[in-house]
């Protein structure tokens, strides 16, 4: 095992988590400023939760998985990509984070 690889992976994942939370918070803030009457509407909230949040998570965590795959390949570990099944750890982690972030926005 390469020394420090786990530390790098944890830092990249925490950075993706922070960027995802910050991006959603910024989008929510600008949504409230641009459409102050719509924010209280259930349809606006569901649109935000069903379209904006998954897109942000897909971008930031997708980049983190690509980075992890490159680090693992260079270190001689088993590559992560392509994902083999629907219950692979990155997908399960993304779903758990999506549910948590949606509940946090609620």
Image (cartoon, helix red, strand yellow):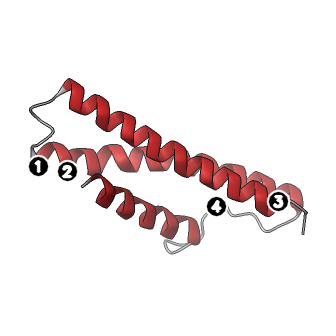
Label 2 close to label 1 by CB (< 8 Å) = yes
Q: CA distance from mark 4 to mark 3?
A: 20 Å
In the drawing, does residue 76 fall left or right of residue 11? right
Number of other residues with Cα within 10 Å of mark 3, as a class: few under 14, some 14 to 19, many 20 or more = some
The tag earlier along the polypeptide, 4 or 3, is: 3
Which part of the image, by quadrant, shows the C terminus? Answer: bottom left
Label 4 close to label 3 by CB (< 8 Å) = no
Query: Would you name the residue on which mark 4 appears?
Result: 82
* Residue positioned 48% across, 61% down in the render: 94
Q: Secondary structure at mark 4?
A: loop
For residue 5, which numbered disc appears in the image? 3
Q: Quadrant of residue 10?
A: bottom right
Q: CA distance from mark 2 to mark 4?
A: 31 Å
Q: CA distance from mark 2 to mark 1?
A: 6 Å
Q: Secondary structure at mark 2?
A: helix
- In the image, residue 77 lies at what x, y percent? 83, 67
Query: Would you name the residue on which mark 2 appears?
Result: 46
Q: CA distance from mark 4 to mark 1?
A: 37 Å
């Amino acid at each position: 095992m390469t020394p420090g690889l786990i530390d790098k992976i944890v830092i990249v994942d925490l950075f993706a988590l922070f960027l995802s939370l910050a991006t959603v918070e910024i989008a929510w803030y600008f949504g409230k400023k641009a459409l102050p009457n719509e924010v209280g509407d259930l349809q606006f909230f569901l649109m935000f939760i069903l379209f904006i949040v998954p897109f942000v998570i897909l971008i930031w965590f997708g980049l983190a998985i690509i980075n992890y795959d490159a680090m693992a390949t260079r270190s001689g570990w088993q590559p992560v990509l392509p994902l083999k099944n629907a219950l692979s750890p990155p997908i399960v982690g993304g779903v758990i984070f999506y549910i948590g972030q949606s509940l946090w926005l609620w």
